[in-house]
Amino acid sequence: MFENVREDFRVYAHLTGVKPGKGLFAASWLFDTRRFIAALWMFPFSAVLLFRLKRWLKDRHAPILPRLCDWLNIVVWQVQIADNATIGPGFCISHGQVTISGEVKIGRNCTFNPYSGCGLVHKRKTGHPWEGLVGPTLGDNVFVGVGGRIMGPITIGDNVRIGANSVVIHDVPKDAVVIGIPARPIDVEDPEQRALVQDVLD
């Protein structure tokens, strides 16, 4: 848990924009403390912390407390993450309103933007065979734009960028950029197509 939290904090600390202090305020521990407070205040870093705490408590069979973590996340950040989701270190939720349901596996350094999520889908909606509660598997460094959805037992490769309001229902190879409903890869070398996804490339 603590190694994951350290990596999560590293991502949020970079986003806070807090500058090192000078003179008496130049101590590294004070700099990290200021960034930690800023991350909790400005971003839903606390939502990620609550998820990590929930998993830690469940592994130790603590009663009630894991559910309290869930309720706090829903009320404060509108974030819902399933108990059986596996999320690697460096996880970032930029502004809340994220849903992750089912047996989802998410790699390292992945980012979810508002109103995005991933999880289960009814087999008749996409033609996938029924596989219980298995949801998507995401590689490392996956970026999900605002409103992006990843649905069903599919695999998303490393370094994939998913455009705003896209719905991904098929496997995506690594290093791809996808947009649309259903999402399809685009050619980022084409200036017209690149302009459609500049927000996820920056």
Image (cartoon, grey):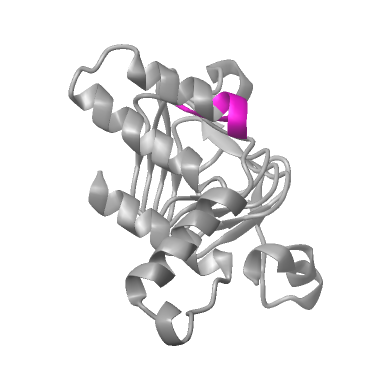
The front one of 129 and 122 is 122
Quadrant for residue 166, please give it. top right
Q: Residue 90 location in percent, x, y? A: 39, 56
Quadrant for residue 48, please give it. top left
- Magenta segment: 74-81
The front one of 162 and 69 is 69
**Identity of the residue drawn at 28% across and 12% down:** 63
Q: Is residue 109 above or below residue 62?
A: below
**Quadrant of the image containing the C terminus:** bottom right
User: Is residue 73 something one can see in this rendering?
Assistant: yes
Would you say 138 lies left or right of 41 here? left
Would you say 198 lies left or right of 156 here? right
Count numbered badges in the picture: 0
The front one of 158 and 127 is 158
**Identity of the residue drawn at 44% across and 31% down:** 153
Q: Residue 136 location in percent, x, y? A: 44, 36
Q: Is residue 186 above or below residue 70?
A: below
Of all residues, the one furthest to the bottom in this rendering is 23
User: Is residue 174 something one can see in this rendering?
Assistant: no
Of all residues, the one furthest to the right in this rendering is 192
The front one of 96 and 75 is 75
Of all residues, the one furthest to the left in this rendering is 60
**Identity of the residue drawn at 51% across and 26% down:** 72
Q: Is residue 68 magenta?
A: no
Would you say 4 lies left or right of 142 here? left
Q: Residue 32 location in percent, x, y? A: 40, 66
Q: Residue 19 location in percent, x, y? A: 53, 77
Q: Is residue 78 magenta?
A: yes
**Quadrant of the image containing the N terminus:** top left
**Identity of the residue drawn at 68% across and 54% down:** 163
